[in-house]
């Protein structure tokens, strides 16, 4: 299998794209570290993928707090004696509202989780990868189609995901010399707990804009994550890969 012998640290692992990433990367041979602010959900994810030949673990993680990220790394090092070579930043939240009504608190909360969280996890774990001389590191960040085009009611979310994409490109330029590849996936509309909050009429309107005429599944994103995590993508870094059913604008 393409990820045999590798260990993957996946944030937001308790649901949605994060959970699917755990399942697909485990299927492809990786040990899984499922990290989520709700550790019970992360443990439930591991129950779906338990294999006797794999060393998996669940960790509690608030990506917006550096102390929590460092504690998670410490737990990982105690279990595996080295950092994971695969980092997948799936943790994300929405706090939707129109720009003129959006509170400063809700703007900052989304930025802290989606953008700052991606920065903290990438910085902390890539420092460990370099220090432990782990070879062929791969970081996969989940950005969004709305980070390119904006979206009504999502000024905070769109701005945070635009930041994730540019953070990815910058990290790729800096970390390439260390043998670490950094790429972003830009999902379109995916069926997750996050999109379940969208009214049905809006879902139908968005689906009509998608050439494939449907929302994507978390598994369809996870398959691309597995590709970017593996040596099959060994000459890809700094890329932003659209996985959106052909959606051009929101």
Image (tube, rainbow, N blue to C red):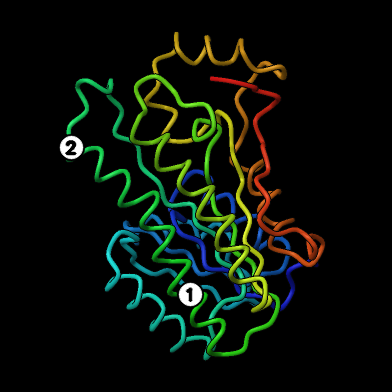
Q: Tell whether 101 sits left or right of 182.
A: left
- Between residues 106 and 7, which one lies in front from this camera angle? 106
Task: Name the residue beneath numbered marker 1.
Answer: 125
The answer to which of 50 and 234 lies nearer the viewer is 234
Residue 164 horizontal/vertical position (percent):
48, 49
Mark 2 Cα shell of 10 Å, populated few (<14), some (14-19), many (≥20)? few
Q: Quadrant of residue 23?
A: bottom right
Q: Are marks 1 and 2 in contact (CB under 8 Å)?
A: no
The percent position of residue 178, horizontal first and vertical second, equals 64, 79
Q: Residue at x 32, y 56 (%)?
A: 38
Instruction: Out of 163 and 9, give the one closest to the viewer.
Output: 163
Residue behind mark 2: 104
Residue 152, percent across and down? 39, 19
Of the two numbered discs 1 and 2 on the same chain, state the one appearing first in sequence: 2
- Secondary structure of residue under mark 1: helix
Residue at x-position 55% and y-position 59%: 170
Q: Position of residue 171 (x, y in %)?
A: 55, 63
Image quarter of the N terminus: bottom right
Q: Quick one: label 1, few (<14), some, or many (20+) residues within 10 Å?
A: many
């Amino acid at each position: 299998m393409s990820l045999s012998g590798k260990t993957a640290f996946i944030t937001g692992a308790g649901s949605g794209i994060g959970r699917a990433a755990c399942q697909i990367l485990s299927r492809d041979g990786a040990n899984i570290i499922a990290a989520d602010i709700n550790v019970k959900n992360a443990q439930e994810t591991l129950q779906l993928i338990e294999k006797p030949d794999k060393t998996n673990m669940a960790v509690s993680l608030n990506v917006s707090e550096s102390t929590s990220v460092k504690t998670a790394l410490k737990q990982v090092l105690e279990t595996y004696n080295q950092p994971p070579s695969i980092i997948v930043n799936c943790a994300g939240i929405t706090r939707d509202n129109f720009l003129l009504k959006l509170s400063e608190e809700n703007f900052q909360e989304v930025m802290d989780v989606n953008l700052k969280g991606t920065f903290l996890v990438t910085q902390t774990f890539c420092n460990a990868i370099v220090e432990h001389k782990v070879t062929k590191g791969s970081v996969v960040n989940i950005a969004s189609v709305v980070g390119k085009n904006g979206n009504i009611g999502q000024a905070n979310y769109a701005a945070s995901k635009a930041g994730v994409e540019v953070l990815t490109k910058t990290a790729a330029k800096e970390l390439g010399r260390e043998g670490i590849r950094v790429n972003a996936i830009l999902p379109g509309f995916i069926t997750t707990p996050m999109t379940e909050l969208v009214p049905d009429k809006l879902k139908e309107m968005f689906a009509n804009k998608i050439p494939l005429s449907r929302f994507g599944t978390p598994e369809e994103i996870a398959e691309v994550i597995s590709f970017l995590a593996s040596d099959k993508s060994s000459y890809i870094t700094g890329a932003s890969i659209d996985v959106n059913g052909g959606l051009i604008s929101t």
